[in-house]
Image: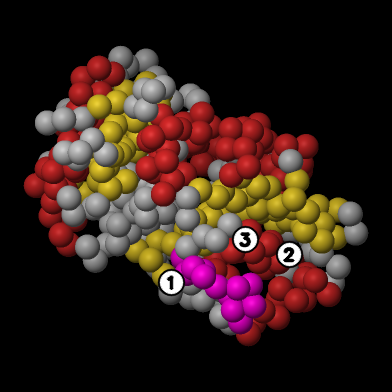
């Protein structure tokens, strides 16, 4: 089977394909690999008979602590016609070649494919992938359940009129209360990280530190934006968004415990959506929500907030794994689950004691 790896000579061609393909995703870009610089980045290309690229898969490779092994992860891959079995097999063969080179025990992917696509699931199973069916909350690397807003060819007025009445009211309330949204740079990452920490403590999740957010702004360049909400010159909320191809993604969001009643998060979302409209995007992606939409779920508030923008509630296929060594895969996965639980417990204990 014919496949090749991205080189300096073919990088621009690779980026052009990923950026313009309907399945293109910022996590498949070379610049995202520069954000994740503690991983090794490799790109795989499949070409058709005329030599044109027909499919790609960018893989991040991370060495395990102590052990001479690596994990391979391809976020929102593959980028291709998802029912083209020949291309999917070629990309997988390329990954297998990398696995030998880097001594990887597993390739993990989380495709941008609807869970209802039985044809894709069958093709991947025939190739040798197994599905790792996670729960309905944020148990996977990437969220399995998201809201996506179709904004293709729409004006700002058409989009905002599509929101629920309550959401439109909250956007205008933030404006009336004097909330000001500013486009900021790395100089505000410390403040953003502090508000993120406050949000993480309130909602029970581990947060990133300021240098990580600054790195996203640096490496993604004009494709990343940090929006901060101010009330009387004090930062009260913030969001980080990424534009790539025909989509804008809401990547991170945070709000302080004070001043939440002036609804800054609604106005921040509207500014990011307006950016997507300005860029003539097809989709604005609100990213993750819980798949458990019962009102007694602690995460229901996040679902209700994003639902108010009237996007489509999307369920992707489950994470898929191509396992190169089953004994190592099961042992490492067990150890990682224990580590994540301990890390979260330590984080919550540390910040709650401050």
* Callout in the foreground (3, 2): 3
Estimate the spatial distance between the alpha carbons at disc 1 and disc 3, rounded to whole Å. Answer: 21 Å
Q: Quadrant of residue 302?
A: bottom right
Q: Residue at x 15, y 59 (%)?
A: 119
What label does residue 278 carry, if any?
3
Instruction: Mark 3 or mark 2: name the one nearer the start of the chain.
Output: 2
Asked if 219 appears above or below 344 in the picture, the reply is above
Q: Is residue 156 left or right of residue 147?
A: right
Q: Residue furthest left?
A: 126
- For the residue carrying disc 1, how many other residues have a C-alpha within 10 Å: few (<14), some (14-19), or many (20+)? some
Q: Answer yes or no: do the residues labelled 3 and 2 have beta carbons within 8 Å? A: no
- Which span is picked out in magenta? 147-161
- For the residue carrying disc 3, how many other residues have a C-alpha within 10 Å: few (<14), some (14-19), or many (20+)? few
Residue 340 visible? The answer is no
* Callout in the foreground (1, 3): 3
Q: Which residue is drawn at 17% across and 50% down?
A: 84
Residue 203 x/y as whole percent: 59, 56
Q: Mark 1 points at which residue?
A: 312
Q: Residue at x 26, y 43 (%)?
A: 54
Callout 3: helix, strand or loop? Answer: helix
Instruction: Mark 1 or mark 3: name the one nearer the start of the chain.
Output: 3
Q: Name the residue under label 2.
A: 264
Residue 199 x/y as whole percent: 65, 53
Asked if 253 appears above or below 269 in the picture, the reply is above
Q: Which residue lies furthest to the front in this view?
A: 50
Residue 149 belongs to the span the image colors magenta: yes
Estimate the spatial distance between the alpha carbons at disc 2 and disc 1, rounded to whole Å. Answer: 23 Å
Colour basis: secondary structure
Q: Nearer the viewer, residue 228 or 58?
A: 58
């Amino acid at each position: 089977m014919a496949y090749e790896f991205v080189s300096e000579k073919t990088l621009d061609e690779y980026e052009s394909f990923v950026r313009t393909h309907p399945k293109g995703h910022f996590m498949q870009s070379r610049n995202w690999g520069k954000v994740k610089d503690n991983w090794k980045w490799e790109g795989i290309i499949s070409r058709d008979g005329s030599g044109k690229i027909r499919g790609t898969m960018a893989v991040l490779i991370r060495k395990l602590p102590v052990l001479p092994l690596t994990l391979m992860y391809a976020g929102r891959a593959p980028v291709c016609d998802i029912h083209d079995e020949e291309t999917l097999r070629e990309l997988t063969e390329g990954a297998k070649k990398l696995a030998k080179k880097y001594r990887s025990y597993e390739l993990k992917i989380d495709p941008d494919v609807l869970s209802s696509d039985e044809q894709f699931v069958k093709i991947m199973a025939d190739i040798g992938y197994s599905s790792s069916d996670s729960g309905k909350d944020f148990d996977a690397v990437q969220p399995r359940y998201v809201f996506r807003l179709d904004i293709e060819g729409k004006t700002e007025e058409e989009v905002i009129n599509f929101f629920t009445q309550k959401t439109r009211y909250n956007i205008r309330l933030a404006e009336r209360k004097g909330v000001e949204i500013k486009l900021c740079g790395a100089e505000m990452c410390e403040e953003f990280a502090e508000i993120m920490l406050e949000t993480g403590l309130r909602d029970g999740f581990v947060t990133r530190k300021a240098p990580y957010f600054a790195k996203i702004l640096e490496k993604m360049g004009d494709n990343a934006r940090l929006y901060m909400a101010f009330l009387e010159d004090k930062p009260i909320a913030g969001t980080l968004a990424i534009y790539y191809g025909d989509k804008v993604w809401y990547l991170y969001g945070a709000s302080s415990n004070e001043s939440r009643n002036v609804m800054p998060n609604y106005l921040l979302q509207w500014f990011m959506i307006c950016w997507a409209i300005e860029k003539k995007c097809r989709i604005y992606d609100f990213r993750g929500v819980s798949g458990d939409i019962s009102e007694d779920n602690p995460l229901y508030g996040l679902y209700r907030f994003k639902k108010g923008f009237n996007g489509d509630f999307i369920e992707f296929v489950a994470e898929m794994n191509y396992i190169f060594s089953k004994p190592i895969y099961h042992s490492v996965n067990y150890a990682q689950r224990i580590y994540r639980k301990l890390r979260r417990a330590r984080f919550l204990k540390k910040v709650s004691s401050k």
